[in-house]
Amino acid sequence: MRITIDLSEDLLNEAMKLTHTSTKTSVIVLALEELVRKSRIANLKAFKGKIDLDIDPNTLRNRN
């Protein structure tokens, strides 16, 4: 998909250097993927301590 956006050239160049990417498209795709990944992790962390699966780690370690 093609889209026109206005970006800071300095910020884009710095991001390309930091991520070792050679194209503007690839650095933007990488940034969007990372944003989605971090958002999914944050959503999973919201469940910490709220789900009780009643699992015994010793039983899991001994299963075959």
Image: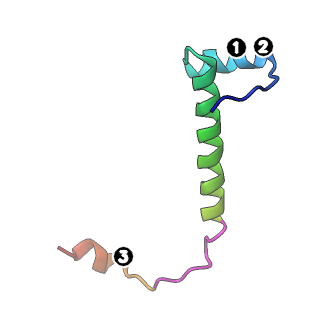
- Quarter of the picture holding the N terminus: top right
Q: Residue at x 54, y 17 (%)?
A: 20
Q: Where is residue 59 drawn, in percent x and y?
A: 29, 80
State the separation of the CA atoms marked 1 and 3: 48 Å
State the separation of the CA atoms marked 1 and 2: 5 Å
Between label 1 and label 3, give the one nearer the viewer: 1
Q: Colour scheme of this structure image? A: rainbow
* Dots 2, 3 in contact, CB < 8 A: no
The residue identified by callout 3 is 57
Where 48 falls versus 30 (above or below)? below
Q: Which mark is residue 13?
A: 1
Name the N-terminal-most of marks 2 and 3: 2
Q: Amino acid at mark 2?
A: Asp
Quarter of the view holding residue 48: bottom right
The residue identified by callout 2 is 10
Helix, strand or loop at mark 2: helix
